[in-house]
């Protein structure tokens, strides 16, 4: 074997070994899409499960089906102050411990009824130690409903939006009217 090739391979291998400690091989990387939030992929998945508990799929699509967790994170990232963002992420990080202490299991192993009761109880917690968790759950609930009702799916297929005043037909009986459109 040529001595130059052997020295080159040795230099490459030792350079690679020097770089290994600086590499982060953890599977929970921080999502780069949200500049102001430090949210991991597992936390985003948990947020999706929480929003799907608030508005589950049934005859119509649920919150997870129309990607409401992305809406929640964008709203928190873009529209909230840095203090509120910190409180939201602190509550998101504290939620798994709250579930484990309250229910004794992980959130995804709970039944639907247990999840609903846990979230409802979490929105009503009092005390300074639970302030971030309560803020997180209330904000998630508010943004889940807002994102779901403002989604394209709801606005086009479930409750079609019509401009005010709409069409006029003076010779219509009240019994012939269609379902009301609540958006004006």
Image (cartoon, helix red, strand yellow):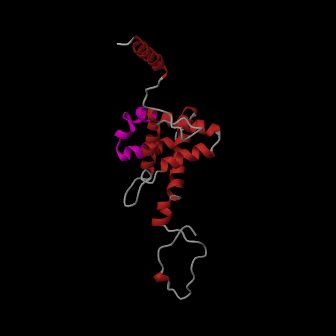
Q: Residue 44: percent from the left, percent from the top?
A: 47, 41
Q: Residue 78: percent from the left, percent from the top?
A: 61, 45
Query: Which residue is pictured at 45% across the width and 32% down the height?
Result: 28
Task: Determine the image quadrant of residue 97.
Answer: top left
Does residue 80 appear in this view?
yes
Task: Determine the image quadrant of residue 139.
Answer: top right
> Image height check: is 55 above or below 101?
below
| Count of numbered marks | 0
Q: Residue 114: percent from the left, percent from the top?
A: 38, 43
Closer to the camera, 18 or 10? Answer: 10
Closer to the camera, 157 or 59? Answer: 157
Q: Which residue lies furthest to the top in this view?
A: 3
Query: Which residue is pictured at 53% across the width and 58% down the height?
Result: 150
> Image height check: is 71 above or below 183?
above
Q: Which residue lies furthest to the bottom in this view?
A: 171
The quadrant of the picture occupied by the C terminus is bottom right
Left or right of residue 58, residue 123 in this image: right
Does residue 141 appear in this view?
no
> Image height check: is 99 above or below 184?
above
Q: Give the range drawn in magenta.
A: 98-117
Closer to the camera, 38 or 125? Answer: 38
Q: Residue 31: percent from the left, percent from the top?
A: 51, 37
Within the magenta stretch, is there residue 172? no
Task: Determine the image quadrant of residue 106.
Answer: top left
The quadrant of the picture occupied by the N terminus is top left
Within the magenta stretch, is there residue 109? yes
Left or right of residue 157, residue 163 in this image: right
Query: Which residue is pictured at 45% across the width and 38% down the height?
Result: 41
By secondary structure, the bulk of the magenta-drawn segment is best described as helix
């Amino acid at each position: 074997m040529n001595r130059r090739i052997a020295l080159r391979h040795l230099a490459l291998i030792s350079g690679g070994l020097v770089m290994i400690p600086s590499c982060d091989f953890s599977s929970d990387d921080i999502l780069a899409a949200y500049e102001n939030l430090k949210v991991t992929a597992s936390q985003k998945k948990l947020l999706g499960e929480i929003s799907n508990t608030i508005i589950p799929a049934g005859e119509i699509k649920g919150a997870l089906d129309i990607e409401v967790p992305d809406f929640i994170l964008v709203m928190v990232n873009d529209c909230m102050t840095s203090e509120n963002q910190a409180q939201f992420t602190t509550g998101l990080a504290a939620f798994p411990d709250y579930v484990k202490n309250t229910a004794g299991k992980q959130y995804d192993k709970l039944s639907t009824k247990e999840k609903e009761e846990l979230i409802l109880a979490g929105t009503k917690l009092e005390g300074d130690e639970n302030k971030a968790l309560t803020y997180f759950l209330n904000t998630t609930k508010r943004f889940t409903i807002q994102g779901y009702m403002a989604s394209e799916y709801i606005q086009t297929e479930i409750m079609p939006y019509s401009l005010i005043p709409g069409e006029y037909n003076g010779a219509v009986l009240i019994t012939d009217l269609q379902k009301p459109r609540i958006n004006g």
